[in-house]
Amino acid sequence: MLYSTTTPEQKRLKLRELLNSGTIAQFPGAFNPLSARLIEEKGFPGVYISGAVLANDLGLPDIGLTTLTEVATRAGQIARMTELPCLVDADTGFGEPMNVARTIQELENAGLAGCHIEDQFNPKRCGHLDGKNVVDTDTAAKRIRAAADARRDANFLIMARTDIRAVDGIQAAQERAKALVDAGADAIFPEAMKDLSEFQAIRDAVDVPILANMTEFGKSELFTAEQLQGAGVNMVIYPVTLLRIAMGAAERTLETIKATGTQEAQVENMLTRARLYDLVDYEAYNQFDTGVFNFQVPGLSR
């Protein structure tokens, strides 16, 4: 009932354990707090919170228009709804090194287990689009150093994302990854890898955990978790998958209503009332107030 009983400190320890477990951790992307609860219920070990999803949910493109306040607030709402550790996309850190430092502490306050900070210029763009620009190594390292220095909980994970592979190639990505680890990164997120050999190249370059982004319609093939683990990957995210499937279903339902004058044909595809009440733990609230839950939940057919 209400929110998570696992403390942020415990979640951060759990994230560290997952990344050092020797097996790959799958983190689906939550697009709202309730989807985070569903991710937990289905047995996944953690939740990813995508910057693209947070922007798109506001009707904005993923080009750095969201603010620290918006991201920390929404990410905190998602994190408090699950017992799982949540990793959030912090874009470029929302400014210069001092802003990056503030970002880390705000995300700590919001209950996140960790974040990743990238090496693009502002305005940034989706990591799987062409035409990206990256900052120089010194600037990228300063962001990560500021993040590492600012955290108050040593277990808050600082992950460095690099987009340089699409600009200067895989060897540059290896060198950038090494520099970011030297600056204090606990893990590396190499964006838009072309194939498994490129993930292996990053694994060969650094001895910290690495993350694979399995986003649809991107630069990378949708490898299985087993394939990625074989290439030395410790964590895989599916950042926009749930948002895309949910919005696809919403679009189809609206088209049905427009065409037929009723949603009846789509009802069989919906989450039932009973299942929704189960996800929000409706009945448990009766422990506090019998006036809240004093009725029979309709059957699973509706």
Image (tube, helix red, strand yellow):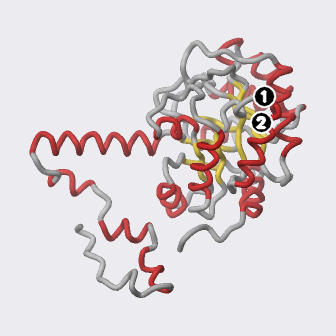
Q: Residue at x 52, y 34 (%)?
A: 215
Task: Name the residue located 76 percent from the left edge and 44 percent from the top edge.
Answer: 104
Query: Marks 1 and 2: CB-CB under 8 Å?
Result: yes
Q: Which residue has dot 2 on it?
A: 100
112 versus 124 height, above or below: below
Report x, y in % for residue 247. Answer: 36, 41
Q: Bin the neighbour count of mark 1 within 10 Å (Cα to Cα): few under 14, some 14-19, many 20 and up.
A: few
Left or right of residue 218, residue 268 in this image? left
Question: Marks 1 and 2, how far apart in space?
Answer: 6 Å
| Residue 7, image quadrant | bottom right
Dot 1 lies on which element?
loop
* Residue closest to the eye, 122 or 10: 122
| Amino acid at pointer 2 | Val
The residue at the far left in this view is: 260
* Residue 72 placement (x, y as % from top left): 64, 47
Give coordinates of residue 37: x percent, y percent: 51, 61
- Tell me the residue at 88%/32% (across/down): 183
**Quadrant in which the C terminus appears:** bottom left
Q: Is residue 28 above or below residue 99?
A: below
Rendered position, 216 above or below 209: above
Q: Amino acid at mark 1?
A: Glu
Q: Residues within 10 Å of mark 2 (few under 14, many from 20)?
A: many
Q: Which mark is residue 275?
A: none
Q: Give 219 or 198, whichever is nearer the viewer.
A: 219
Q: Position of residue 187 (x, y in %)?
A: 77, 39
The answer to which image quadrant residue 193 occupies is top right
> Can you identify the residue that label 1 sits on?
96
Seen from the viewer's position, the closer of residues 21 and 41 is 41
